[in-house]
Amino acid sequence: MARIPLLLALLLAISAAAAAAAQVGGNRGHGPLVGGWSPITDVGDPHIQELGGWAVERHASLSSDGLRFRRVTSGEQQVVSGMNYRLVVSASDPAGATASYVAVVYEQSWTNTRQLTSFKPAAAH
């Protein structure tokens, strides 16, 4: 009979330790957490740069403001049913003035889906 309370206490301790590890970063080394934003470590990656260019082109075609893509300067990604990308892009207007914008792109590679969900000037620091 004394074994059951001891076994129960041991199981509770193991469960609590596992839950604490998961909250403190138990996903280290295993890629981004589902639902959480994580930094894009290599914004020079050709796919990331292509996404940034696509986002500026898509925005320009919808708004007719003549923005031209220069480069992605930073970004984050979020695993969903596909991937959300929050990219800080540098773009120039027809007069040549350069500014930063935040583009959010949803991509689902296995269905060839790509959507520009948001495009706005980056907040001034």
Image (tube, rainbow, N blue to C red):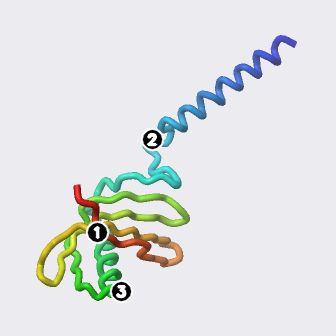
Cα gap from disc 2 to disc 1, whole angstroms: 33 Å
Cα gap from disc 3 to disc 1, whole angstroms: 16 Å
Residue 77, numbered label: none
Give residue 97's quadrant in the image: bottom left
Secondary structure under tag 3 reads helix
Crowd tier of the residue under label 2, counting other residues whose Cα lies within 10 Å: few below 14, some 14–19, many 20 or above: few
Say left or right for 74 vs 16. Answer: left
Q: Which residue appears farthest toward the left when viewing the image?
A: 96
Q: Earlier in the sequence, mark 2 or mark 1?
A: 2
Residue highlighted by disc 2: 28
Residue 62, numbered label: 3
Task: Identify whether 102 is placed above or below 26.
Answer: below
In percent of width and height, residue 124 lies at 23, 59
Q: Please give the count of numbered marks on the rendered protein.
A: 3
Please identify, in this view, whether the residue under mark 3 or under mark 2 is nearer the observer: 3
Nearer the observer, 29 or 90: 90
Secondary structure under tag 1 reads strand
Pick the quarter of the image with the N terminus.
Answer: top right
Residue 121, numbered label: 1
Pick the quarter of the image with the C terminus.
Answer: bottom left
In percent of width and height, residue 43 lies at 28, 60
Mark 3–mark 2 CB contact (< 8 Å): no
Q: Earlier in the sequence, mark 3 or mark 1?
A: 3
Cα gap from disc 3 to disc 2, whole angstroms: 40 Å
Please identify, in this view, whether the residue under mark 3 or under mark 1 is nearer the observer: 1
Nearer the observer, 46 or 90: 90
Residue type indicated by callout 3: Leu
Q: Residue at x 30, y 84 (%)?
A: 60
